[in-house]
Amino acid sequence: HRRASRDSMPFVLFLALLASATAAPTTKGRRANEQPKVRLVVTGETNVARTTRGARASNRVAQMAAWGGNVTMTIRAAHNTFTVVEVADPNEARLFKEQAERSGLRVEEDQRRYPGPSVATRTQPLAEETPWGIERVYNGAVPNASFFPSAVTHPLCIIDSGYLLTHPDLPSDATAADPLQADPAGTMYFGDDICNHGTHVAGTIAAIGGDGEGVVGVFPGAPGLKIVKVFGEAGQLDDPPGWPNEACGWTYASELVDAVQRCVDSGAKIVSMSLGGGGPSSTERDAFQTFFDDGILIVASAGNGGSSSYSYPASYPSIMSVAATDISDAKASFSQFNDEVDIAAPGVDVVSTVGPPSDPGYDSFSGTSMAAPHVSGLAMVLWNKYPSYTNAEVRTALEGGAEDLGEPGRDNEFGHGLANYQGAEMRLGAPSPPPSPPATPPAPPPPPALPPPS
């Protein structure tokens, strides 16, 4: 394969690069069986023009093409610029990396991120029911509607496979965090979910209470949810049909960083991600640390491998990694365990909302994907009831207020313990305990007896 030098690059090729470099990043779910080219993320550029979702190709972009890389997008997120490049094969990737690093750039493989696999059992509640996990994180009884904040100053953003906007048991005011996903005719429309995964997560967070049907979420009817779809591109259907849908296969770490930036740009302060993959990424790690430093609270599932291996992004220190428990408060057999697990939550036989639009209903899923939204939902309640606290203080309260399980203190299976709203609220220092009643003064001594009459 011959690579043209920068000076000899045809003008037509440069125009093609301009188009590819200036196109807005679009997040698409990949087919599970798709075999892509090697994809790389390049950071450290000093010569990329400032853009609004891309405006001009830079000399650096042209140089990357001369090294054999096809620039597919430029992402601006976490105060940085990430250039995504595809090359034909691992050998081309090695050559590209050598040349880029000689120019002072950092290059690494763009890691894949997958929706957490779940075991599903179709169910249809006869009337409204409260899933066991929702009761568990509230000490057995979900508070009444007046307990929950009516105004949301710290919105929550779900990054997953979409949100079935027409489901009767989900809030209808959820919006696309990425404006490009707001078009119902688009293949990545946020308000559809051919995978069911994101809709199930959303129901655990926000299923409407008091409507006489379905289930109840951690924050019933939570207002103002933001959604970014990274799995489940419409039109990529199984052949033959089956489960899982091929379109629900995977996305890239770079696109996940871009998705979080979309959440932040939409005003979200909490990000919930029930997804992950085994390969770490320094680009992803640094971006998530920047988001946390900027005041964003991020929650992710610990992984379903049932081993001590790490799943990312959950295992980055800036993210709350959530393990799964069963109805007996034991660690779920599939839940990953390691020194990055921060907290545990219900994740076995969790009933929540699913589609399709023609038949909205409910499924029982199991996975750390089901545990994570219990924690992000609690964070939304807590932070919006007490909005003056920081993301770090809310995280510390959730961890410190968890019910200790397993070995005393923090351990690798449960982290700090089972998520518990009341414990987190008290650890946060609110509400203040009622004042103690004043001490009762001692009774005065009885008067001396009068002498008998003479």
Image: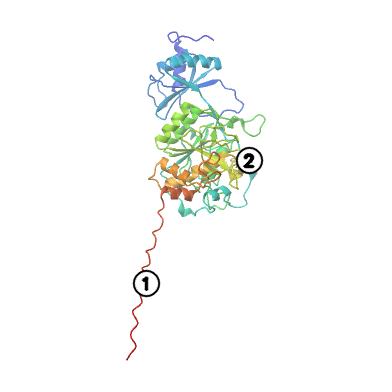
Residue 78: percent from left, percent from top: 41, 30
Q: Amino acid at mark 2?
A: Ala
From mark 2 to mark 1, how far is it between C-alphas?
Answer: 68 Å
Q: Residue furthest left?
A: 454
Residue 220 is situated, as x and y percent measured from the top left of the image, at 50, 49
Q: Nearer the viewer, residue 339 or 352?
A: 339
Identify whether 69 is placed above or below 139.
above
Identified by mark 1, the residue type is Ala
Along the line of sight, the residue nearer the viewer: 284 or 363: 284
Residue at x-position 55% and y-position 51%: 135
Rendered-image quadrant of the C terminus: bottom left
- Residue 339 in percent (x, y) is at 52, 36
Coordinates of residue 136 in the picture (x, y in percent): 55, 49
Residue 442 or residue 354, whichever sits in front: 442
Of mark 2 and mark 1, the one earlier in the sequence is 2
Indicate the quadrant where residue 48 lies: top left
> To which quarter of the image does residue 53 belong?
top left
Nearer the camera: disc 2 or disc 1: 1
Q: Residue under circle 1?
A: 443
Depicted 49 relative to depicted 219: above or below: above
Which structural element holds mark 1? Answer: loop
Image position of 10 with respect to 379: above or below: above
Q: Residue at x 42, y 8 (%)?
A: 7
Residue identifier under label 2:
120
